[in-house]
Amino acid sequence: MTETLSPRAQRLRAAGHKLTNARLTVLQALEASNGHITSAEVLDAVDRLDPAIGRASVFRALDLFTRMALIRPTYTGGSATPIYVLMPEGHHHHIVCVNCNRVIEFEDCALDQLSAQLEARLNVRLLGHLLEFYGLCEDCQSSQLTVVSNQQAMDS
């Protein structure tokens, strides 16, 4: 049975947690979403998969997955509602456009050395990280350049 479990489900089992139907269903909903999903969307997806699973079970699973660094809540677009992101291999990275709220994902973060230094200096064991940069995407940069150029033409 282990070979049919996702790597995240295997991590749950290896950490000594029971693989309940609720946990596996929530995990399935998260993985099907590619890991960018609100709690309301998780609830809807879980309800479609198994209507017998209650809200409390979903939120307990989300809490456990967060504590295990399988997911992390992030607050993009000024939302008060978190978007849960999957933490492949313990980390996840975004660039968020502050103009249009576009989220650009990237894989390479080169934080291995910093992580090792933090662990040694602060005597902690890091399980993962969520890295977000904020700026302007290519489209918004072009739009702003056009606005600036038009403004300069009107001023002359």
Image: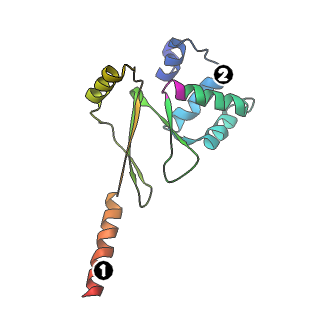
Q: Quadrant of residue 145?
A: bottom left
Q: N-terminal of the two: label 1 or label 2?
A: 2
Residue hosting label 2: 21
Q: Which residues are magenta?
A: 66-70
As drawn, 87 above or below 36: above
Residue hosting label 1: 150
Label 1 vs label 2, nearer the camera: 1
Relative to 150, is 23 on the left or the right? right
As drawn, 88 above or below 148: above
Looking at this view, is 121 or 65 the one in front? 121
Circle 2 sits in a helix, a strand or a loop, which is it?
Answer: helix
- Identify which residue is drawn at 61% across, 40% down: 39
* Colouring mode (rainbow / by chain / secondary structure / one colour): rainbow
As drawn, 75 above or below 108: below
Mark 2 Cα shell of 10 Å, populated few (<14), some (14-19), many (≥20): few
Mark 1 Cα shell of 10 Å, populated few (<14), some (14-19), many (≥20): few
**In the displayed image of the protein, which residue is found farthest to the front?**
122
**80 drawn magenta:** no
Location of residue 47 in the rendering, given as x and y in whole percent from the top left corner: 69, 36
Relative to 61, is 94 on the left or the right? left
Residue type pointed to by label 1: Asn
